[in-house]
Amino acid sequence: MASNKQVILRDYVAGFPKESDLVFNDATVDLSVPAGSNKVLVKNLFLSCDPYMRIRMGKPDPSAAALAQPFKPGQPIYGYGVSKVIESGHPDYTKGDLLWGIVGWEEYSVVTLTPYSHFKILHTDVPLSYYTGLLGMAGMTAYSGFYEICSPKKGETVFVSAASGAVGQLVGQLAKIMGCYVVGSAGSNEKVDLLKNKFGFDEAFNYKEEQDLNAALKRCFPEGIDIYFENVGGKMLDAVLLNMKLNGRIAVCGMISQYNLEEQEGVRNLSTVIYKRVRLQGFVVSDYYDKYSKFLEFVLPYIREGKITYVEDVAEGLENGPSALIGLFHGKNVGKQLIVVARE
Amino acid sequence: MASNKQVILRDYVAGFPKESDLVFNDATVDLSVPAGSNKVLVKNLFLSCDPYMRIRMGKPDPSAAALAQPFKPGQPIYGYGVSKVIESGHPDYTKGDLLWGIVGWEEYSVVTLTPYSHFKILHTDVPLSYYTGLLGMAGMTAYSGFYEICSPKKGETVFVSAASGAVGQLVGQLAKIMGCYVVGSAGSNEKVDLLKNKFGFDEAFNYKEEQDLNAALKRCFPEGIDIYFENVGGKMLDAVLLNMKLNGRIAVCGMISQYNLEEQEGVRNLSTVIYKRVRLQGFVVSDYYDKYSKFLEFVLPYIREGKITYVEDVAEGLENGPSALIGLFHGKNVGKQLIVVARE
């Protein structure tokens, strides 16, 4: 037996989550897999903080419960992580293997492998933490959302909100690789600087300093927007709808600005989709996990050559996990937020 | 020269249009086409009242002006109509030919033919007035919207709002022909009766008598909605978003509930499109006019066999045109609203 610190959801959250909504539990874990089980015992190295986790912290929503199971109060929360196999009952994994996929917010997890629930990490010449983001769920979200949902073409104009986040920074770089004109929005001047000077966006703006989002978009897109990669929802979406071009596409990846509101903001400019023939399409990354190896083949060379870069915001220790996760909903993170649970 | 009564837009309209926003003008018209011109002089028989006309009555909207030209104050309004050729400078038309397409709200119009601007009427064994609706723009809207945008499959569940209107009644019948379960909403019990007993909808409800649209939809769609054919916008769309099924599709044809509002209602449930992978797609019928002859081949046999039916609300005389058009925005029409300008 070993000690196994866990992060527990105290109770369903309404409004903005607070650190006190997450409590620690000193559990113990049997460092073995029962004989005959095909489960895998892993030691968690990195955990990922992702906006969708807020949805799982809320009360079960009858219209979405089957699609996004809420966390259980009193139980550890869970999310994407990078882990090392300690003992395996599964034929595909052996001790020492590295994997990424869903694990508990705890030091050790026993995971059940289902198709595409976890992916073995085979390339370790790139930073291992990248598998919490760039080379994991967030990267696949950017890749599948951009190529499968946005139908991008060279020379088109692309707008990305939450553009310095885990997904947005890659969407922008993919759009540049395709030869698009790319603009991003973010919530601080430091992030705007990253967008322009590190990720190669053509333009970027700090939405908190713009009095009129419509005017900001018109300034950046005098001819309008072909593709909007939607991460925030609310007022930004309303302003974008006024600036879409004919046959524009909106890939709805997330709406982080809405997750903490008791009632979501109303979007008033939806009728613009009619004459502009706009397509707005929600998507979930897990539908595209069969393309993961194709994604790696595509993205690894760019990373190795330094042509795709990635900024991470690293919190040290599981004890700093709750504040890191909650900081995400206030935009405190600069780049992809992750937690180091253990270095090896 | 002949007298040519016209319906003129007095000034741009804000809010609900009033009859006084439309005024009559006693003009005259030269009953000939100048030598060398390829224009066509027509006598207007029927005029169509369509919701989109409200958009053209408003002030030019900079974000949509290029896509939906507003009517000009002081000039006749225009819309779809069925007309007879009096004199033609165009090689494809001769005196006595019937056509449908855009004409002024007046007794005689001089029209310039551009590709798909007007269609020669070749089948007159069906009511000629049908070419203002079922066999004209509205029918093509239903046909292209349903087959091209909704991606319907046999057995799917379909919801149509403004279902007894010019477009909705055909959408419902097309969905039944495809083997879908079809529910419609309308604004009076008389219209609900038509939906169930004349057009063959499986269920229908009067949205004005439902305290909770979400509950009404849950009652009609316990398993959810695969396809929503959107004609109204606002609160109905918000309720529909709560009831869409996984991979649902929303064809945004129109949003009549919003056209008369100074500020559009906010739609609060848009984030449901993410987990449900919903596609919401605006469309405009004119993009599909190349399929008009295919549409006729499809729909005429059904009409002749009585398997597709159509209800029209007929106003007699151009002098009753303004009240008919304005009545549309109050749901006064039962079925497709048209105006008889002349019987022949």
Image (tube, coloured by chain):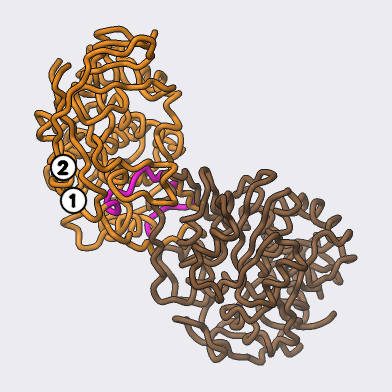
Chain colours: A orange, B brown
The kind of residue on which mark 2 rests is: Lys
Q: Quadrant of the N terminus of chain B?
A: bottom right
> Pointer 2 and pointer 1: residues touching (CB < 8 Å)?
yes
Residue B124 counted in the magenta span: no
* Neighbours of disc 2 within 10 Å: few (<14), some (14-19), many (20+): many
Residue A248 counted in the magenta span: yes
Q: Which residue is mark 1?
A: A206
Q: Is residue B23 visible?
A: yes
Q: Quadrant of the C terminus of chain B?
A: bottom right
Which element is circle 1 on? Answer: strand
Asked where in the image residue A222 lies, by quadrant, the reply is bottom left
Asked where in the image residue A323 lies, by quadrant, the reply is top left
* Neighbours of disc 1 within 10 Å: few (<14), some (14-19), many (20+): some
How far from the left and from the top, in percent, is residue B192?
67, 71
Chain where mark 2 sits: A
Q: Which residues are magenta?
A: A242-259
Q: Is residue B234 left or right of residue B81?
A: left
Residue nearer the viewer, B338 or A259: A259
Q: Is residue A193 visible?
A: no
Residue nearer the viewer, B111 or B21: B21
The mark that comes first in sequence, 2 or 1, is 2
How far from the left and from the top, in percent, is residue A194?
16, 38
User: Residue at 54% across / 91% down in the picture?
Assistant: B20
The kind of residue on which mark 1 rests is: Asn
How far from the left and from the top, in percent, is residue A68?
38, 42
How far from the left and from the top, in percent, is residue B60?
44, 72
Q: Which residue is mark 2?
A: A191
User: Residue at 44% across / 42% down in the picture?
Assistant: A66
Residue nearer the viewer, A140 or B275: B275
Q: Where A226 sits versus B189, above or below? A: above
Q: Where A38 sits versus B127, above or below? A: above
Chain where mark 1 sits: A
